[in-house]
Image (tube, grey):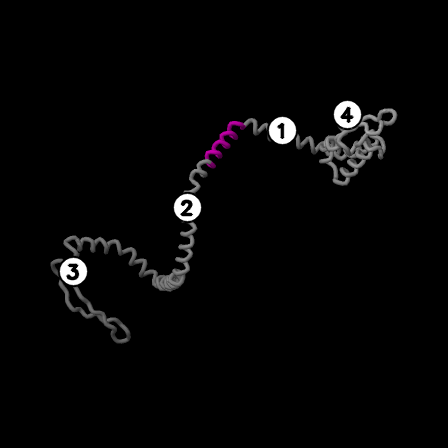
Amino acid sequence: MTAISRSRTLPAPPGRLPPGSTIPLARTSPALDIDALIGGFRPLFRALDPDQVNALSGQLLKIFQGQGGTLASVLSQTSMLTSTLAGHSELIGELITNLNTVLHTFAARDHEFSDGLDKLAQLVDGLAQRRNDISTGLAYINAATGSVADLLVQARPPIKDVVHEADRMSAQVLSDRDYVDNLLKTLPDVYQVLARQGLTGDYFGFYFCEVLLKLNGKGGNPIFVKLLGQPSGRCTPR
């Protein structure tokens, strides 16, 4: 007598047992573990479609329950199903070769890989020890970002006016660029003269050698009127 779905099996003895008789556990044996049996086909199942897996599992169960064909027919079907794997043997071989290359590279750089893991562990440990400082720093960064955003919102109108005026000033400078260029070239000499004038104190001393008054004359022509002049002393031409 066999009970596939139960936990124990026992051979059927000749004749009938008397009413009320019991069969000791020692005279029984464990039933067939269907899960273990099906699990043995797990590598094959991974390569099959779900429908093929269900069909093969169902046939195995029927065989052991006495409802199916022979085990040979199941093995024959299994052989037909594994032809799919045989058709991909080249791909599987290439995969194994590539995996071997990767493992060889890891083995050759074992020390570097170990050092990298050690340094990563040290970094993580250091970050864990300073997590409070990092959290505080992130909070300050968040607050500073908000302050900068508020500042830009408040400063946007003045900045817009400055950009507009700078554009207008640039247009004026470009319209008289020759004068500006000459001014920039002569400023260094003028600054040196002014620096010498301020050596004696916090004041400047000026000597008027000549004062001319420029007026607009007839037809727009300039007229120069000399108000004073001193051709000697400090004002002697050189």
Q: Nearer the viewer, mark 4 or mark 1?
A: 4
Q: Amino acid at mark 1?
A: Asn
Q: Which residue is mark 3?
A: 206
Position of the C terminus, as image quadrant, is: bottom left
Query: Quick one: which residue is furthest to the right in this view?
Result: 15
The spot of residue 6 in percent (x, y) is 77, 33
**How far is disc 2 from disc 4 in space, using C-alphas?**
73 Å
Query: Quick one: which residue is furthest to the front in this view?
Result: 20
Q: Which residue is mark 4?
A: 24
Q: Quadrant of residue 43?
A: top right
Q: Secondary structure at mark 1?
A: helix
Closer to the camera, 227 or 43?
43
Q: Quadrant of residue 73?
A: top right
Q: Above or below — where is 188 with respect to 88? A: below
Q: Secondary structure at mark 4?
A: loop
Question: Upstream in the sequence, badge 4 or badge 1?
Answer: 4
The segment highlighted magenta reads 109-124
**How far is disc 4 from disc 1 in space, using C-alphas?**
55 Å
Closer to the camera, 105 or 186?
105
Question: Upstream in the sequence, badge 2 or badge 4?
Answer: 4
Question: Upstream in the sequence, badge 3 or badge 1?
Answer: 1
Count residues near mark 1 (Cα–Cα under 10 Å), then give few for <14, some for 14-19, many for 20+.
few
Q: Secondary structure at mark 2?
A: helix
**How far is disc 3 from disc 1 in space, using C-alphas?**
93 Å
Q: Which mark is residue 136?
A: 2
Residue located 46% across and 34% down the image:
122
Q: Are marks 1 and 2 in contact (CB under 8 Å)?
A: no
Q: Which mark is residue 100?
A: 1
Count residues near mark 3 (Cα–Cα under 10 Å), then give few for <14, some for 14-19, many for 20+.
few
Q: Amino acid at mark 4?
A: Pro
